[in-house]
Amino acid sequence: MKLRLAKVGLVAVLVGLLAQTAVRGVAHSDLFGCNGCHTPHNADALPGVPLWNGLETQTTFTMYSSDSFQGTIDGQPSGNSRLCLGCHDGANPDFAWMNPEHAFGADDLTSSHPVSFVYDSGLAVLDGALKDPSEASTLGATIAEDLLDGESKLQCASCHDIHSSGIGDSLLRGYDYGNGHGPQLCRMCHLK
Ligand code: HEC
Ligand code: HEC
Ligand code: HEC
Ligand code: HEC
């Protein structure tokens, strides 16, 4: 683990030398290479993240809850959300330079769109204003195929595409939330 982090660390320092604004809208693959998240050998297992390099967050998160949320959320971030938080938890010393607005501390998931829960037909029926995940996402295939992980879970990568520069400044899939296209992103799943 130490060795892996050391490898990522060198790249991270180089990225940190760039002005923070210079990294906006640049694909994570181009910032960190592939080994920021994957490793070709001795990979660790994390559902939804093939050949995971084992990058771990040390933070214990309070997960999202509300009176109206009807999903069953995992006890801690799972799948690719857990990977993202390995760097975005504000506690990884390699990324101490990260803009605090891009870091998620122990309580910050309580005030973010819920992640790490199964989004299936049952939940869509229960909610009454969600598309069935077998419906088209508008990105070419179904919601399940385009936006959910292999366990049908909604994760950080449901809205963000770290392999590409995405749409707008925030690596978004499909639509820019901040630039007048906001509702389309959300309406890939919500009937509102
Ligand atoms: C190897 C470390 C690392 C991992 C893993 C990682 N990120 Fe990042 N990410 C960063 C750094 C560093 C920045 C730049 C931070 C800044 O500018 O303050 C960043 C920036 C971002 C931004 C802002 C992009 C922009 O162009 O302004 C988004 C959105 C983002 N990451 C989402 C994600 C998501 C979603 C995941 C998981 C699928 C993820 N990241 C995984 C390190 C990482
Ligand atoms: C910031 C983390 C991160 C970086 C950097 C990254 N990946 Fe990934 N990769 C993921 C995640 C998360 C998934 C699974 C979810 C998804 O595809 O969005 C994935 C899935 C994949 C898959 C299997 C699914 C598919 O889309 O075919 C391949 C192949 C892959 N990555 C290759 C690469 C290569 C090659 C690079 C470097 C050019 C790279 N990745 C860089 C996080 C990353
Ligand atoms: C439901 C969709 C959705 C999910 C799920 C989601 N995000 Fe985002 N995220 C957005 C949108 C839209 C923005 C840009 C608008 C904003 O800042 O509110 C954003 C902004 C960001 C930014 C700031 C980037 C910038 O350009 O200012 C980061 C970092 C980020 N997300 C990381 C994550 C991480 C890590 C997760 C998982 C824990 C996650 N997001 C889950 C939709 C989502
Ligand atoms: C990949 C599909 C998907 C996308 C994209 C998406 N959501 Fe959601 N969202 C869900 C699911 C599934 C739930 C859980 C529904 C429930 O249990 O009530 C949810 C829950 C919510 C909730 C209710 C939380 C609660 O406590 O009841 C709000 C509000 C919400 N989303 C807003 C948004 C906004 C705003 C966007 C766009 C920035 C967005 N969503 C994008 C799938 C999505």
Image (cartoon, helix red, strand yellow):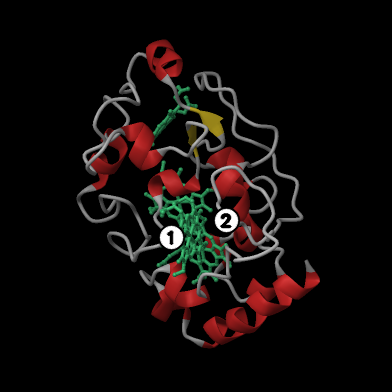
Residue position marked by numbered label 2 in the rendering: 84
Compared with 110, 54 (above or below) is below
Looking at the rendered structure, the kind of residue marked 1 is Ile
Res 79 → quadrant: top right
Q: Is residue 135 left or right of residue 133?
A: left
Tags 1 and 2 in contact by the CB under 8 Å rule? Answer: yes
The residue at 76%/55% (across/down) is 58
Q: Cβ(mark 1) to ligand 2 < 8 Å?
A: yes
Percent x, y for residue 186?
31, 38
Query: Which mark, by number, is residue 16?
Result: none
Percent x, y for residue 64?
59, 34
Neighbor class of circle 1 (other Cα within 10 Å; few <14, some 14-19, many 20+) is many
Percent x, y for residue 104?
61, 54
Q: Is residue 184 left or right of residue 42?
A: left
Sequence-wise first label, 1 or 2:
2
Q: Cβ(mark 2) to ligand 1 < 8 Å?
A: yes
Res 61 → quadrant: top right
Residue position marked by numbered label 1 in the rendering: 162
Compared with 190, 39 (above or below) is below
Mark 2 secondary-structure assignment: helix
Neighbor class of circle 2 (other Cα within 10 Å; few <14, some 14-19, many 20+) is many
The residue at 22%/42% (across/down) is 140
Task: Let me know if residue 160 appears in the view.
Answer: yes
